[in-house]
């Protein structure tokens, strides 16, 4: 058999995403690893952000109807018009973002949209700047494009919130000898739930304009604002929207992460460049789902409000239980699926060791936040002992998770050293 190492791009992508183990073997993503661990030991899986609740029956019916109507062969490269029109309509209706259907491109989830945009718009040897912690596909896509990933931390604040380090941002953009070609903003942010304000976004837009960078967005949690605020798309707050490439998807808003219906929105010639790459990744996918979702987005988007309400109820079940753990700090998320818990006052273990201990001893599995950071970075250090827990699971799982956090809290009240080190705790 030819040597699989003869080509090295796949290995560079794995390496960029932190998947190469010390012995050279390739590991699974942290989401896959933690889902497997939870299943193996029968722990409650508050790790991977995969909803434990179903899409609405009307959405399933709409996709089934599209199948019966014959939308079963390759979709047009740009996507079915029903979806392109619906996305343009939805952006205007929900966020006041003016979008023409010729700007919209269907992608196989936000993941393909982000990868295709990075492959199309990042010059070889160029850099992409994003905020850290970050979603795990970003470094792999940047490696595939032959570029360099740079990061600015979103740091925990004294009041239990989060804030980007703007001094580092300025240094990394207008202060850099070789400024980034792309600035990637994930808002609302995974894992912190931080939402960039219109002022933050305008500031990023000005910096991008000063160095002629693209602004690429990842807005997959756009409908899941939990604290009564509103999501502001970067393309709305940034003075020159033509440099903004918007990416989002239906997975989170409609509890349909497996359908992989996502989209990119950009000026037509930019959309075309991204489509050129995208067509050689999947060509097209999810035809009947595109049509079914398009109809729902246009005609009956009310489920999105119900879903937000239900998610808020599950956050209200889990977060107070996390907060009952004496000495831990659990964030109250402004948006999204997750709370971030900082255990630094309670343990000498790092987040990986602690997550393992909590899994085996208390049946609680989360995602260690340093897995979403670059080793050695300021964010990696700041989140050294932080674990992300998701409340997007079924109400029964979230309730079970909440009960387990209360068990942990009770134990720590009698023995505050229970998590201090593996030796003490096991
Ligand atoms: N970006 C972020 C921040 C995410 O959390 C996820 C996970 N769903 C994605 C992108 C990927 O989205 P999709 O499933 O639509 O590819
Ligand atoms: N976006 C989800 C998360 O952050 C799941 C991602 C995945 O499994 N690739 O948990």
Image: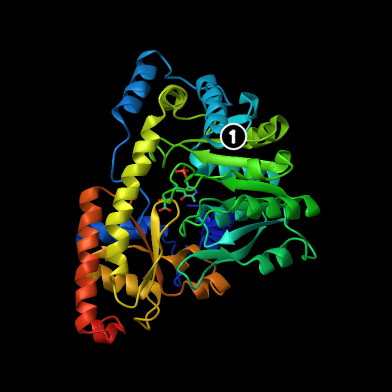
**In the displayed structure, does residue 259 sit left or right of residue 237?**
left
- Residue 39 vertical position relative to residue 240 in the rendered view, above or below: below
Q: Which residue is mark 1?
A: 96
Q: Position of residue 227 (x, y in %)?
A: 43, 51
Q: Position of residue 77 (x, y in %)?
A: 58, 25
Q: What residue do we see at 41% from left, 49% from top?
A: 226
The single residue placed furthest to the front in the displayed view is 228
**Measuring 39% from the left and 18% from the top, which residue is drawn there?**
66
Q: Nearer the viewer, residue 183 or 233?
A: 233
Q: Secondary structure at mark 1?
A: loop
Q: From the top left corner, tell me how far across and down residue 317 is, in percent.
A: 27, 56
- Could one spot residue 194 in this view of the protein? yes
Vertical side of 230 occupied by 362: above or below: below
Left or right: 141 with respect to 387?
A: right
Specify the quadrant that holds the C terminus.
bottom left
Task: Name the residue rendered at 45%, 36% in the picture.
Answer: 250
Q: Is 267 above or below relative to 414?
A: above
Image coords of residue 103 (percent x, y):
64, 29
**Snapshot quadrant of residue 407:** bottom left
């Amino acid at each position: 058999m030819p040597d699989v190492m003869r080509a090295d791009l796949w290995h560079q992508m794995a390496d960029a995403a932190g998947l190469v183990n010390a012995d050279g073997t390739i590991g699974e993503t942290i989401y896959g690893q933690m889902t497997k661990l939870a299943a193996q030991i029968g722990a409650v899986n508050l790790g991977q952000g995969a909803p434990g609740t179903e899409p609405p029956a009307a959405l399933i019916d709409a996709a089934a109807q599209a199948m019966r109507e014959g939308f079963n062969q390759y979709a047009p490269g740009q996507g079915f018009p029903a979806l392109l029109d619906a996305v343009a309509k939805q952006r205007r209706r929900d966020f006041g973002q003016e979008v023409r259907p010729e700007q919209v491109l269907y992608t196989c989830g936000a993941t393909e949209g982000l990868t295709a945009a990075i492959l199309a718009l990042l010059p070889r040897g160029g850099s992409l700047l994003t905020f850290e912690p970050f979603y795990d596909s970003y470094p792999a896509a940047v490696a595939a494009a032959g570029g360099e990933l740079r990061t600015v931390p979103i740091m925990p604040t004294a009041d239990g919130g989060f804030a980007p380090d703007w001094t580092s941002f300025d240094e990394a953009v207008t202060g850099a000898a070789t400024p980034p070609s792309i600035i990637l903003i994930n808002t609302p942010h995974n894992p912190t739930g931080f939402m960039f304000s219109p002022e933050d976004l305008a500031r990023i837009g000005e910096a991008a304009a000063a160095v002629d960078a693209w602004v690429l967005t990842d807005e997959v949690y756009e409908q899941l604002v939990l604290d009564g605020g509103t999501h502001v798309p970067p393309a709305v707050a940034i003075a020159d929207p033509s440099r903004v490439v918007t990416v989002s998807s239906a997975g989170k808003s409609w509890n349909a992460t497996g359908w992989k219906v996502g989209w990119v929105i950009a000026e037509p010639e930019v959309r075309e460049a991204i489509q050129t790459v995208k067509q050689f990744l999947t060509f097209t996918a999810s035809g009947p789902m595109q049509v079914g979702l398009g109809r729902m987005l246009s005609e009956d988007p009310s489920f999105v409000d119900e879903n937000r309400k239900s998610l808020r109820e599950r956050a209200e079940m889990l977060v107070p239980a996390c907060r009952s753990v004496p000495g831990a700090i659990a964030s109250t998320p402004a948006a999204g699926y997750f709370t971030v818990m900082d255990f630094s006052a309670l343990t000498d273990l790092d987040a990986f060791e602690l997550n393992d201990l909590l899994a085996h001893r208390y049946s609680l599995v989360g995602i260690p936040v340093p897995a979403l950071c670059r080793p050695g970075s300021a964010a990696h250090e700041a989140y050294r002992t932080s674990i992300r827990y998701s409340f997007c699971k079924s109400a029964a799982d979230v309730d079970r998770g909440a009960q387990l956090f209360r068990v942990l809290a009770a134990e720590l009240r009698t023995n505050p050293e229970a998590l201090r080190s593996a030796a003490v705790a096991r």
